[in-house]
Amino acid sequence: MSSTRTLIRGGLVITAADEIHADVLIEDGRIAALAAHGSAVSEAWTAGRTIDATNKYVIPGGVDAHTHMELPFGGTHASDTFETGTRAAAWGGTTTIIDFAVQSVGHALREGLDAWYAKADAKCAIDYGFHMILSDVNESSLKEMDKLVEEGITSFKLFMAYPGVFYSDDGQILRAMQRSATNGGLIMMHAENGIAIDVLVEQALAEGRTDPRYHGEVRKVLLEAEATHRAIQLARVAGAPLYVVHVSAEEAVAELVAARDKGLNVFGETCPQYLFLSTDNLAEPDFEGAKYVCSTPLRPREHQAALWRGLRTNDLQVVSTDHCPFCFEGQKELGRGDFSKIPNGLPGVENRMDLLHQAVVDGHLTRRRWIEIACATPARMFGLYPKKGTIAPGADADVVIYDPHVEQTLSAETHHMNVDYSAYEGKRVTGQVETVLSRGEVVIDGREFTGRAGHGQYTPRGTCQYLS
């Protein structure tokens, strides 16, 4: 049997709970056993392949619970396909993504879901699941939610932003939340007051304020905080749990803290762009700021401290990327002279694990917390744990050998995302993915891609594992 086995020797195994010098035995795509390095048990193991992890970390593959491959937006679509995007994810040490299937207004949830199944089928280099975007809450889509939960699509995203596209009003939101309170689904909320923002957009453009930086100015912190507060109250009325996506502002974090202090099942996610970038980037001259247009927008640098604090105190539980890349040339440029036409989104699926390791180096996070917010908690939040998100007997052998000592410079020249710029161009970070296994198969081998489109499997999910 040794030929189907892989043995990882000599590394420091880091999970959300432990750091142990252990050897890891993999068999038939799963973690078979861990044993202390140099112990009689581990010395007796034989395997067809042995990977030396001396002086390296052995960590679970990342779980990125918020990506948008091939997302249609503003007359174009995200530049990463499921093939290019999942390959880039693997390069960055992420072995599972949860993407968003989109319901179009006037169409059934099933129709949107089937379209996304088709986009991803036989294309992915790593495993994937789907959330469902609800764009049209009505009697029939509410009924469909129950069926989707049974099928392993256990989370539903609603938008308080983007009137005329994805927007749901408070009544629709309440109905969807009431439904999720009974079917076990988790409502994910884009919390920004889109109706008020549209007024400010219109006024800014009328006054000739058209540059990318005004995207950040009109999408005000207070309108994120207000919508976060409103979403929490609606969830309380419905008796439903709530997960707020891409939290960017100190005042929005404060709303989550207040809710959690009351013991409510309210959860928050932030993204690397809010931790490492700011309105300084949006203000870059010659339309360069367009590269950083996303929603919620980048905030002034002083908001970063509250986000790091939220991650340390567990008032924010997850760091996902909201990976939604648009090329600068030909896509972001659609908004020259009108910031409201710049496609919203940043590339990041390849950078998340490295940026969060840099946060460990910088003293913002512990190593275990790094793994918790990037691997274990997203897996638990969205019903994938302990299959994903940890290194333990029985778990899928999604394992990353991570070199914490290598220095690298992030750049579009060297990244694998299908986009013509890097949001972190020139940033030096310490730490790099060396080897990646997905269900026991080596997909990155010593900084070489050895995976293939179609290896990744669709993974149905259970319900949120944080709900009592």
Image: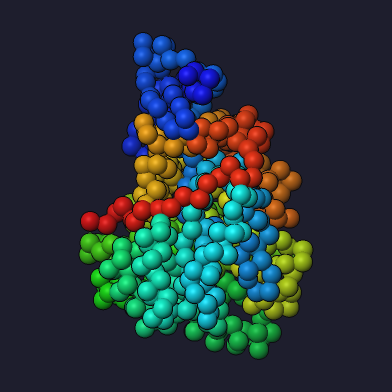
Where is residue 269 shown, x and y percent of the image? 43, 58
Residue closest to the eye, 408 or 64: 64
Going by the image, does 301 lie left or right of 151? right
Colouring of the image: rainbow
Where is residue 435 shown, x and y percent of the image? 58, 31
Q: As displayed, is residue 44 above or below residue 187?
A: above
Q: Is residue 34 visible?
A: yes
Q: As displayed, is residue 444 above or below residue 56?
A: below
Task: Name which quarter of the figure residue 18 lies in.
Answer: top left
- Which residue is found at the position 51% from the left and 50% from the top? 458
- Which residue is found at the position 51% from the left and 32% from the top? 440
Task: Name which quarter of the figure residue 233 lies in.
Answer: bottom left
Where is residue 122 shown, x and y percent of the image? 61, 49
Residue closest to the eye, 364 or 265: 265
- Which residue is found at the position 41% from the left and 81% from the top? 138
Q: Is residue 278 visible?
A: no
